[in-house]
Amino acid sequence: MARKVAVVGGGLFRPDIWHGENAEEGVAIAYKDLLKSVPNLTPDDIDALMMSYFSDHLNGQLCMGWIIQDYLGLHGKPGYRIESGGSTPIDALVNAFYLIKSGYYDVILIPGWEWMCEVDVATTNEMIASASDTDWDFPVGGYYNAYYAALEVRHMQLYGETCEDLGRIAVKNHNNATHNPYSQWVSLHGTGKITMDDYWKSRMVCWPYRVLNNAVMSEGAACLLMASEKAAHKFTDTPMWITGVGLGTDSMRPGDRTADFVYENFKEEAKIYPDFVEPIKTPYPDMANFASLNIAAKRAYKQAGITNPVKELDVAEIFAPYDGVELVLYEDLGFCSRGEGKTLIREGVVEFDGELPVMLSGGLTSQGHPVGATSLYQILFLYYELAGKMKEKYGPDALQVPDARKALITGHGGTGCQGAVMIFEAE
Amino acid sequence: MVIKREKTEKKYMHYPTVEDKSTEAHKEWEPWVHKGLWAIKGYQVVRGPSGGGTVEEALKRKPKDFMVIDRASAALYSHSYGLVSPFFRGLLDGKLKGTKCPKCGTVYCPPRAHCWNPKCAVAETEWLDLPLKGVIHTFTIQCLAASPFANMLPFSMGYVKVEGADTTLPMFLHIDPKEIFIGQKVEIKFAPKEKRKGELMDLYAVAVPSQKVPEWSCLHKNPRDMEMLQESMKKTLEWVKKRYGIDNSPEVRGW
Ligand SMILES: [Zn+2]
């Protein structure tokens, strides 16, 4: 693999429940933030753009990507939209990676955004849920909170985590977000810490998920700059190299994963399956785990030469719209064996001072979740972690992992219908 | 060759309608077409923070006034259920149908018109009637729902593995959360014939009587979880009553 590809910087317009600025202005603010932090970047350097945004329904504007490219004055350059639900922003990155790696381009700008609060919350939920199967899943009380709750109940039953474990993840992530001055949590609730008691008091949405377990609705934008090895050092002394990229997909409907032939040969993964439940055709992933991410992780680890992720990785950001997803992915990403996700949170392995801190940004439930920008925020966060410059960007209270060298991020669309894993390394 | 199409009364259909239960919906939604989609209906001016940087930096700046307009969008989609239409027509007759692959024998409910087993090369499947019984594969209890279901809260939704099928079908569970568990045997029931619309909400599941909740059931292991859930459901009931004027308590709605 001759050509290396790096993330060389980024800028952000913080996620919040509402912005007076509209999407193009928000992206412009993020782009300006990028230009400020990468002073050597001129618009002439940018070869192409990958536009990252999820929904057309939420703003009633088709081809919003054209507006954005025009607004930044970057029309004329090659550019197009990437869309794959929650996986949108990471897939934009993956796509840019392929294009740079192939030698076609040297510098790609990824603007990502979502403006999710133009319609009321119930309608926003409904519009997002139209990414689920509208013939077979949506018509039954459906929205993603419910599907993911049902998936989590299955995992909970098979492998024994408790409501308390889900609370522990919520408390960890929200308290991490209090160190992130760009987070939606800080905007709405300030920097005070929360406790398990706050968790138990937060409103039940779909059992076992409470409000504090769920991703927020956001408006926000981010811009990431990616470059080839040839171009990278013009922009930064601390490029973040992409050393592993894995993609995976899964069935559209989680209900079909009980007889999913794609996973017939997952004999190893299927081994750990409790005997108190009725056997099914494909016991892995069942509806409990995410095979798309398991496949993606194996591919990414192989490229990056990672054999023991907890030992070799220094920090991880996971795309978890609901806290159970984070716990389940500890398993599918090989941080522990299946059924042991609960142990990692109970033993503090994934806390800031643990062996592998996960979600120091606060993640989707507390940093914010404007879909097209979400992973870009997380990647920018990892960029500063690996550069050792957290405090420069996120202030004196930021959670800088000492000597962080390797990081992992996941992307995740639908009910795990699509997933991506990327491994980043500091220079 | 020109295919001659029969003339129908509804100009939006290209082929004859052999059964019509959509007139009312079209009547109800037709005016929307003339309401002027995307026309601006009003505005408000909102004073809020602006600009980039951290929360603190944004709040320090002088707020700006933003003009926020209201515009509406709506449409009635006439969507085909495709080759699995017999499943939904079956619901109207109180029948639960699945499909079976003649090559690998997999039974699908939800049905698939073509087998997805890569070895079967998208073989066309065959219809079969399934028994009205199954097992709860997983479930959730909803205290919040998307708009079309909000007035039905609280309720339980689950995936049911119908007897003989290999995949699972989502449906409402008319079962008290105190009794509900993964692995529970259920009977599948239909809404009264006159209320059926040929959609998944035409069916629901009830528990087969006198099953004991196993001690490993995740919802029942810790009594505190059940207590807190009951409390949340109570609050949800009150909210629905206040918001929609509907009493969804089990004594009133019967489940
Ligand atoms: Zn087959």
Image: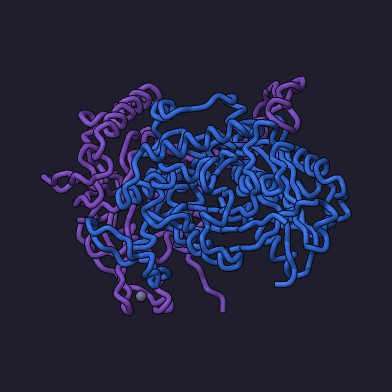
User: Which image quadrant shows ligand 1?
Assistant: bottom left
Q: Is residue B1 left or right of residue A381?
A: left
| Residue A373 in which image quadrant | top right
Q: Position of residue A307 (x, y in %)?
A: 52, 64
Q: Is residue A402 depicted above or below B9 in this figure?
A: above
> Compared with residue A418, is residue A150 higher up or lower down, i.e. above or below?
above
The blue-coloured chain is labelled: A
Q: Which residue appears farthest toward the left when viewing the image?
A: B210
Residue B7, percent across and down?
49, 62
Give percent across and percent down for residue B109: 31, 61
Q: Is there any visible trace of residue B79 in the rendered image?
A: yes
Q: Nearer the viewer, residue A128 or A145?
A: A145
Q: Is residue A294 above or below residue A369?
A: below
Residue at horizontal 56%, vertical 53%?
A410
In terms of depth relative to the viewer, which is nearer, A263 or A315?
A: A315
Which residue is nearer to you in this view: B99 or A92? A92
Residue positioned 82% across, 63% down in the render: A230
The answer, for residue B201, to whether it is visible in the render is no
Of B179 and B168, nearer the camera is: B179
Q: Quadrant of the N terminus of chain B?
A: bottom right
Measuring from the top left, give residue A50's x and y in whole percent. 72, 56
Quadrant the C terminus of chain B occupies: top left
* Residue at (66, 44) in percent of width and height: A381
Q: In which quarter of the view is residue A191 placed? A: top right
Which residue is found at the position 31% from the left and 71% from the top? Answer: B106
Vertical relation: A395 (above or below) A224: above
In the displayed structure image, the side of residue A38 where residue A2 appears, left or right: left
User: What tint does the image give chain B?
Assistant: purple
Q: For the image shown, how many numbered marks are present on the structure?
A: 0
Is B89 placed left or right of A143 in the picture?
left
